[in-house]
Image (spheres, rainbow, N blue to C red):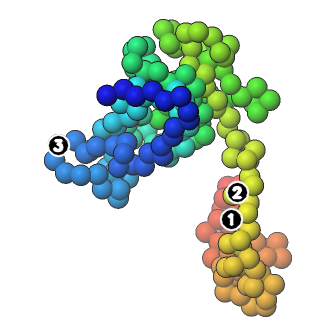
Amino acid sequence: MVRRFAYPVYTQLKGADLYERIGKGKYKRIEFHEHPELYRCEFLPYAEQTDILLNGVYWDKNVPRLFEKENIQADTFIIRTIADITDDAGGSVPVNLGDQPIENPVYGVDRTTFQKTEPYLPNSIDIMAVGNLPNELPRDASRYFGEQLIKHVLENLVGEGSVIIERATMVKNGKLTPHYEYLKEYASGN
């Protein structure tokens, strides 16, 4: 059943919402990550209900895409804008044709030819794909990182003789530390 709303409605989809095990069995996160070929993506019903997709899923070439390029040609595929935060060209969003600079973040993809176009054209889907976007929106990540740094590392960092800091230190006084001596050949350029 298709429902339309006069106000914004959103949902956050997790792995179990997006992927279904082929054959018998239920979605199992660990199995999915180890054997994605055992699963198929069930995203298309959502593409029939939404105008905007904000994609932030991890993608690997073995993981089924959210949809295939040809799916955007269907009248039932009503998505008009895709913000691909993960920015894997040809990845989970197969109509992501590559990076755009932050100054000009949006381009169009023609639904018929799959070619890059100017954005906001009648027969296109608008794609925002900026490779350094996480760097452009650092506030929440920086706050969380800072809180974790203070909570778990600061005392070790300012103290003397911390095992945690010692193990994390790659180079000291211009030389590789014992935990990182395996990088000696790489560091010398051989």
Residue 159 location (% of width, % of height)? 79, 89
User: Which label is found at residue 144?
Assistant: 1
**Image location (x, y in percent) of residue 139:** 75, 55
What is the quadrant of the N terminus in the image?
A: top left
- Secondary structure category for the residue under label 3: loop
Residue farthest along the left direction in this orientation: 24
Residue on which disc 2 sits: 140
Residue that numbered label 3 is attached to: 23
Which is nearer the eye, 55 or 88? Answer: 55
Q: Secondary structure at mark 1?
A: helix
Residue 67 seen in this snapshot: no
Using a 10 Å C-alpha cutoff, classify the residue at mark 1 as few (fewer than 14 neighbours), some (14 to 19) or many (20 or more): few
Q: Quadrant of residue 101?
A: top right
At label 2, which amino acid type do we have?
Asp
Mark 3 Cα-neighbour bin, 10 Å: few <14, some 14–19, many ≥20: few
> Image point 67% across, 38% down: which residue?
131
Q: Position of residue 72 (x, y in %)?
A: 44, 18
